[in-house]
Image: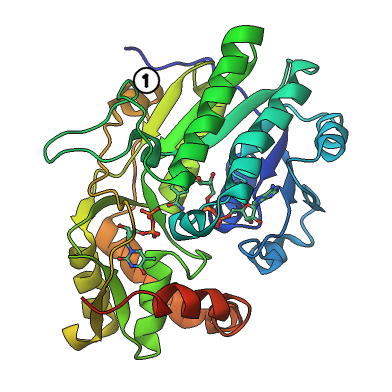
Amino acid sequence: MSIDTSKRQPKNVLVTGAAGFIGSNLVHYLLKRWPDASIVSLDALTYAGNLANLKDLDDVPRHRFVHGNICDRETVSTLLDQDIDTVINAAAHTHVDRSLLGADDFAGTNVGGVQVFLDAIKQRPHIRFVQISTDEVYGSQAPGEDADENYRLTPRNPYSATKTGGDLVALAFHHSFDLDVVITRCCNNYGPYQYPEKMIPLFITNLFENKQVPLYGDGLHARQWIHVDDHSAAIARVAESGRSGEVYNITSGKGMTNKEMTAKLLAITGKDESLIKYVTDRPGHDRRYAIDDRKIRTELGWSPVVDFDEGIKQTVQWFVDHKSWWEPIKSGQYRKYYEEQYGKRVEQ
Ligand code: NAD
Ligand code: TYD
């Protein structure tokens, strides 16, 4: 397959979920990569959205924040009419454990929000829609097996089921109405500004506080981990050159068990194994995610550049340096969720 040279140059970009982890890192990245582009950041500011993640962009004239919900048709239409040529949809409800407690918000945003956008883009078919999805839509892979873009879709928790729903709605609008839709499916991300309910920031910050880290089940569930900047670069590449109607997997190829990841975090923070607490497993916990991303590498010429050991050390350092970012989250509204969630999980 030859590398696609018909590069689009986005000029007016709408990034949704822009006050979340990936969205905020992506906005920072895109402002540098596309120096002539203006970016509108849209976010509903749910518990996971945090304006502090975009604070340093307050005085950047090419950037503007809008507080709004992707399920709101009027908000979406009004924004799209402001000359937008590219939408990157990173807004979602994203935490598997929360989706097991209640999935209304997940279905509403992850499926319904996508449909609202596509209905609006039907009237504005010059707009490219980039849907940020996840490797979790493929469900669990057996040892030695990697999921490429044609792998069966077998999501097995409410979060991944609703992400799959969003992908299918987006592809259906491409096929039915010839809309310019591209989908990315990435492995697990790590990096700055990740909300401390997710494994890596939760474990790092618990270790700083000399609290135990709750490892689910036997700790042998495996994930692939990519630095958020490598994910952002892949998203930009897909927005520029991805073929309409196509899906692109994105991974670092760096797979490891949760126990191995925990050992790395213990080593970096200088703590010992007494801080590991094996707790009741997550219901329906997918055993292994492993994807094959040869398509984006060969077709679009993307590959990750962040070395895992370096990236994870820098991430730990970021949390050391940004206590003022995560401490209020952990001692605020999030605490009730954490206490309920982990109060139910008994030691194994
Ligand atoms: P996050 O939970 O940190 O951020 C999600 C953001 O979306 C929040 O700022 C939230 O306020 C906003 N949001 C939620 N519902 C909204 C709505 N209805 N309207 C507007 N904004 C809304 O999540 P994240 O980790 O940054 O994930 C971003 C995207 O990347 C998601 O689509 C997720 O499925 C995908 N993804 C994440 C990972 C990962 O490891 N974090 C891996 C692959 C794909
Ligand atoms: P998470 O960061 O929630 O991402 P995802 O479920 O989307 O992969 O979890 C990563 C892995 O870590 C997953 O296998 C579940 C596990 N995990 C724990 O063992 N303990 C925890 O407290 C959390 C939040 C996750």
- In the picture provided, is 81 more to the left or to the right than 344? right
Quarter of the image for the N terminus: give it: top left
Q: Residue at x 57, y 75 (%)?
A: 334
In the rendered image, is residue 277 in sight? yes
Q: Residue furthest bottom?
A: 210
Q: Residue at x 39, y 17 (%)?
A: 3
The front one of 225 and 333 is 333
Q: Mark 1 packing: few (<14 Cα in 10 Å), some, or many (20+)?
A: some
Q: Please give the residue where the numbered disc 1 appears in the rendered image.
A: 299
- In the picture provided, is 260 more to the left or to the right than 344? left
What element does badge 1 sit on? helix
Q: Residue at x 67, y 44 (%)?
A: 16
Q: Residue furthest left?
A: 144
In the rendered image, is residue 35 in sight? no
Quadrant of residue 289 in the image?
A: top left
Quadrant of residue 47 in the image?
A: bottom right
Q: Is residue 241 above or below residue 35?
A: above
Q: Residue at x 46, y 55 (%)?
A: 100
* Residue 135 place in picture, x, y as percent: 37, 39
* Residue 236 place in picture, x, y as percent: 53, 35
- In the picture provided, is 71 more to the left or to the right than 294? right
Q: Is residue 212 above or below residue 309?
A: below
* Residue 159 place in picture, x, y as percent: 48, 46
Question: How many marks are shown on the rendered structure?
Answer: 1
* Residue 261 place in picture, x, y as percent: 24, 65
The image quadrant in which ligand 2 is located: bottom left
Q: Amino acid at mark 1?
A: Glu
Quadrant of residue 59 in the image?
A: bottom right
